[in-house]
């Protein structure tokens, strides 16, 4: 219940209280339970004055606020019977939005990692491809350099073959039959092989090609001329240009041909002579080229650094 005390009622109450105390004090002082007249009455103890029931309503003082059983508790205080209600704040759960954001961030991170890996793989493939192309370029340059060196060396050879190495019949003269003139002995000669004279349609080209391929060494020029002749017989042609193109001769055709080369060409094509008793079709300079393919063929003879081969059977 809500009780209030007005100012006029408060004054009346205070006045009545004072009057009641004043009237009751003498009566209390005159009363005595002790029969002895000479015994002074005991001091009256302070007691609360009797208050009528009707006045009690005005004496009850309450705050001007309604009492509420569900008032706020003092922080940290847990009352009996309410221990289950904790005063500590509940731990906030992760919102769904934050979970979704975390999942998106994780997916983005994984995508970035995959993208970085793919980029690394692409760079590695490009690097290997560049290395392969660079290796091919260097190999091509090396082969070109070897060919140039071979040509330069062939042109630089100016030595003359000693007279002892030259056959007695080196002068060009007509011959109608096969020849058994072989200048260089070999370990495994072909008993069925015999040299033969052959007329060509481009003699000047023939001599210039032999000069370009070998130079001024007589035996070397004879071997080169034999390669050209044996190739012509095999292919059924008498054109030096056809053999040059088909068998991959790279040396230039020289205009100035030495007498040594002319004698070597005459010995092979006019007399039917040969350098060795074995057909030969290919050769390479082993000091300036690797000759991988040549070495898969049948090796016949070597003159200085130049190795000659016939097809492997």
Image (cartoon, grey):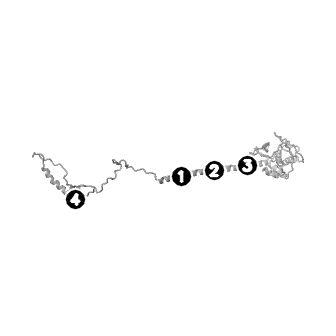
Which residue is at a point 47% across and 53% down the rendered structure image?
Answer: 96
The residue wearing badge 3 is 143
Residues packed near mark 1 inside 10 Å, few (<14), some (14 to 19) or many (20 plus): few
Q: Secondary structure at mark 3?
A: helix
Q: Nearer the viewer, residue 27 or 268?
A: 27
Q: Secondary structure at mark 1?
A: helix
Does residue 237 appear to the left or right of 136 in the view shown? right
Q: Secondary structure at mark 2?
A: helix
Distance of label 2 from label 4 (alpha carbons)? 105 Å
The residue wearing badge 4 is 9
Which residue is at a point 21% across and 55% down the rendered structure image?
Answer: 53
The residue wearing badge 2 is 125
Does residue 276 appear to the left or right of 49 in the view shown? right
Does any portion of residue 254 appear in the rendered image? no
Q: Earlier in the sequence, mark 2 or mark 4?
A: 4
Which residue is at a point 22% across and 59% down the rendered structure image?
Answer: 9
Residues packed near mark 4 inside 10 Å, few (<14), some (14 to 19) or many (20 plus): few
What mark, if any, has residue 107 been given in the picture?
A: 1
Residues packed near mark 3 inside 10 Å, few (<14), some (14 to 19) or many (20 plus): some
Asked if labels 4 and 1 touch by Cβ distance under 8 angstroms, the answer is no
Q: Earlier in the sequence, mark 2 or mark 1?
A: 1
Distance of label 4 from label 3 (alpha carbons)? 131 Å
Distance of label 2 from label 1 (alpha carbons)? 27 Å
Q: Earlier in the sequence, mark 3 or mark 2?
A: 2
Does residue 83 appear to the left or right of 37 in the view shown? right
Where, quadrant-wise, is the C terminus in this rendering? top right
For this orientation, the residue located farthest to the bottom is 8
* Mark 3 vs mark 2: in front: 2
């Amino acid at each position: 219940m809500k009780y209030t005390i007005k100012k006029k009622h408060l004054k009346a109450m205070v006045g009545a209280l004072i009057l009641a105390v004043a009237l009751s004090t003498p009566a209390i002082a005159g009363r005595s339970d002790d029969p002895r007249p000479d015994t002074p009455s005991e001091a009256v103890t302070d007691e609360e004055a009797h208050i009528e029931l009707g006045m009690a309503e005005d004496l009850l003082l309450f705050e001007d606020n309604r009492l509420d059983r569900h008032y706020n508790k003092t922080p940290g205080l847990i009352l009996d019977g309410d221990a289950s209600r904790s005063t500590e704040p509940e731990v906030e759960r992760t919102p769904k939005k934050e979970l979704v954001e975390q999942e998106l961030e994780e997916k983005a991170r994984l995508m970035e990692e995959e993208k970085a890996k793919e980029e690394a793989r692409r760079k590695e493939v490009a690097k290997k491809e560049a290395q392969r192309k660079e290796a091919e370029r260097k190999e091509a340059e090396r082969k070109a350099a070897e060919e140039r060196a071979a040509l330069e060396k062939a042109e630089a050879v100016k030595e003359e073959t000693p007279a002892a190495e030259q056959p007695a019949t080196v002068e060009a003269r007509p011959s109608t039959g096969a020849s058994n003139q072989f200048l260089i002995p070999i370990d495994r000669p072909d008993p069925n092989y015999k040299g033969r004279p052959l007329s060509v349609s481009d003699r000047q080209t023939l001599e210039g090609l032999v000069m370009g391929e070998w130079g001024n060494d007589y035996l070397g020029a004879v071997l080169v001329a034999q390669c050209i002749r044996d190739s012509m017989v095999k292919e059924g042609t008498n054109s030096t240009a056809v053999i040059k193109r088909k068998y991959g001769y790279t040396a230039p055709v020289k205009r100035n041909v030495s007498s040594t080369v002319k004698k070597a060409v005459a010995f092979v094509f006019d007399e039917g002579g040969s350098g060795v008793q074995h057909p030969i079709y290919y050769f390479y300079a082993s000091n300036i080229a690797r000759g991988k393919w040549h070495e898969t063929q049948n090796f016949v003879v070597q003159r200085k650094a130049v190795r000659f081969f016939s097809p492997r059977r």
